[in-house]
Image (spheres, rainbow, N blue to C red):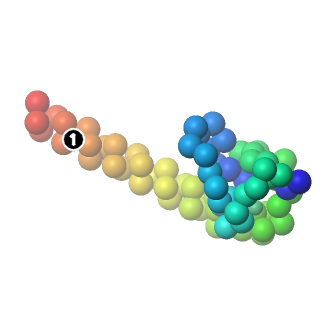
Amino acid sequence: MKTHFDPYPHCEEGEEQAVCGTWMGEASNLSGDWSRVDCQRCLGRKEKISDAVAAEENEIVEQMGHMAAHMREKH
Ligand SMILES: [Zn+2]
């Protein structure tokens, strides 16, 4: 059993593919804690995955900012 990294372990949506690209079966675990991740593919891409997560979070924050600005314009 391997533990893959999951930046959003509390997300309700069922993930079928781990961040490293591995299709997950029932024998796969997910963890948001790198110290518990033992998938070599995830660990090998740790830096890239961390960058991607940070970029995605920035994007979400930016989109929320646009949305908030849009809402203010409408009302
Ligand atoms: Zn993995």
| Residue in the picture at 73% in, 58% down | 24
Q: Could you tell me residue 25's position as x and y percent?
A: 76, 55
| Residue in the picture at 34% in, 49% down | 63
Residue 46 visible in rendering: no
| Residue in the picture at 74% in, 48% down | 30
Q: Return the residue at label 1.
A: 69
In the foreground, 33 or 9: 9
Residue 37 against residue 75 in the figure, above or below: below
Where's ligand 1: which quadrant? bottom right
In the foreground, 41 or 28: 28
- Residue farthest toward the front in the current orientation of the protein: 26
Q: Quadrant of residue 75?
A: top left
Q: Quadrant of residue 11?
A: top right
Q: Could you tell me residue 53's position as x and y percent?
A: 57, 55
Q: Amino acid at mark 1?
A: Ala
The quarter of the image holding the N terminus is: bottom right
- In the rendered view, does 22 fall on the left or right side of 75? right
Q: Could you tell me residue 74's position as x and y percent?
A: 10, 36
